[in-house]
Image (spheres, grey):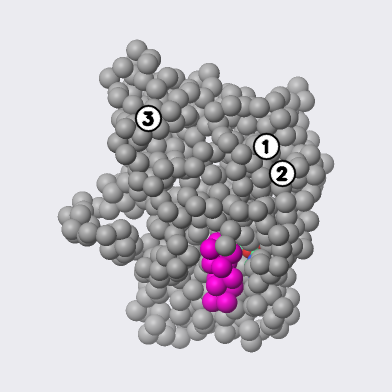
Amino acid sequence: MTANWTAGYRTEAPYPLRFHRELNPRRLALAMLAGGVAPPSCDQPYTYMELGFGQGISLALLAAANPQAQFYGVDFMAEHVEHARGLGEAAGLNNVHLSQISFTDLDKQKFPEFDFIVLHGVWSWVSADLRADVLKFITAKLKPGGVVYVSYNAMPGWAAMEPLRELLKLEFDRAEGSLEACIKAALRRVREIEKAQPLFFRANPTIEIRLGQMESEGAAYLAHEYFNAEWKPWYFEDVAADFDKAGLTFAASANLHDNVTDLTIRPEGRALYAEMRTVLQRETLKDYLINKQFRRDIFVRGPRILPDGEFVALNAAARFAALMNPDDLNDAKLTTEAAALKLNSPVHRALVAGLANGARTVSELVAEPALAALNTNAAFGTLFLLTAMNAVEPAAAEVSPLSIERTQRLNQAILQRAATGNSIPAVASPLTGAGIELNAIDQLFLRAVMDSAEPVAAAAEAFKQSRQTPLRDGKPIAPGEVKKYLRERHALFVKSKLAACKRLGMVG
Ligand SMILES: C[S@@+](CC[C@H](N)C(=O)[O-])C[C@H]1O[C@@H](n2cnc3c(N)ncnc32)[C@H](O)[C@@H]1O
């Protein structure tokens, strides 16, 4: 199979419906602030561009929850643009502007200057020419102080996989038939080759794990991930050099815990890490210490280092909302390459309990008697970790009636699809100004709350109507067990999610 008009990018199947919380500008701003870099304000009007937006889920969720901002997106796949447009229309959004063009044509269209330009799942999968087009666009269109988020497959974590992907691609290109048939044939053939015990496989035992993971993925994901003409894991140093040419400097990782040394690097490596003098050296060594496979970098045009006074003031003014109930902290864990962190001390619980009635700033929280022992910087640091753990989320300063109306309209459209097998894995919150993950079954329960329906019966009926079966660990539940399973899931939803869904303004 060959594909030329797309510069070798596979466009036969649309990208899966995925949500990435890291594309939320408030999380990017939080990572910058924690690193002492002046963050952009996300409460003022701003402009945001996603290059290669896939199904447009992040764009729609962000646009609904932030009517003060303008969201742009470029993707060359007609199906992607159509899907994203459909979401925008369902929610009555007038602040999403989509262009079905290739990155090669970015300079042929009129765009404003941007505060944020984000690219998720693009950099490792497009050609040198297209990366040059993207950098030219960033050079021309990113405002001073503007922020770029770029994710990519990283070295050395993908070192063993690069030759395997070449082998898979060779077999894929030799195969005939549909996209799915070619992918299956390539995987089958590589398993046959494996039986011949090639020395490459023996020298790289992680290949077996990776092949197993690939076999459990759908064809659409595998096509976008492994079977494009281009596929290149990058060293941080090379990506930083490219962005340096566009006048940008590395500011932080959008993977929040990656910014915390003790959470990323095991004790044995910390002294070596501390000896490194530059960001470039530190990040490079870190990638070896943790065998980094995927990076989510934040680059800034002219980052301004915050003076102490301003850093403290911005820490105090940072606003958060709770995604969890304090009791659920007992079951939550932040597992990283170096540690498994529990945040369930009385102080952690008091911080989350302080957000039980809505979003509050750090200075409001530390005024609580239960939190009087914390200064604002310590409270901010803890809330940063709680954000990394997905127990809290940065929040908007104001919740406008328009953001409430639009998020609720968008959520209604999302919840309607929950049982169809085509569900969107997140809903929007006007309080956080972003999307929040919510699985399909919990979405059905939320829909029942909106409709004042009996939740278990309503969810069972929704599955029946769309001829779908709820899944447990990816496997269908037996017909006679569906109601029992939904009752168990509903009990968990009521215990852990319902209060947050209401508090976060997801439904009216
Ligand atoms: C791996 S997907 C990621 C989608 C989305 N950012 C997400 O994370 O859900 C990459 C996206 O880039 C788009 N893309 C790839 N090459 C492109 C090009 N040359 N011009 C425009 N879009 C492109 C694809 O259509 C696809 O939607």
Towards the viewer: 384 or 470: 384
Circle 2: is it few (<14), some (14-19), or many (20+) Cα within 10 Å? many
Question: What whole-number distance in Å separates the C-alpha atoms at marks 2 and 1?
Answer: 7 Å
Towards the viewer: 105 or 140: 140
Q: Nearer the viewer, mark 1 or mark 3?
A: 3
List the residue tagged with mark 1. 67
Question: What whole-number distance in Å separates the C-alpha atoms at marks 3 and 2?
Answer: 31 Å
Queried whether the magenta region covers residue 152, the answer comes back as: no
Residue 169 in sight in this render: yes
Picture residue at 65% right of the left edge, 57% below the top: 53
List the residue tagged with mark 3. 313
**Magenta range:** 128-139
Left or right, 108 with respect to 153, comes to right
Circle nearer the N terminus (2, 1): 1
Circle nearer the N terminus (3, 2): 2
- The quarter of the rendering in which ligand 1 is drawn is bottom right
Q: Amino acid at mark 1?
A: Pro
Q: Is residue 349 above or below residue 298?
A: above
Q: Please report contact status of discs 2 and 1: CB closer than 8 Å, yes or no.
A: yes
Residue 95: which numbered mark, if any? 2
Magenta stretch secondary structure, dominant: helix
Query: Which structural element holds mark 3?
Result: helix
Question: What whole-number distance in Å separates the C-alpha atoms at marks 1 and 3?
Answer: 27 Å
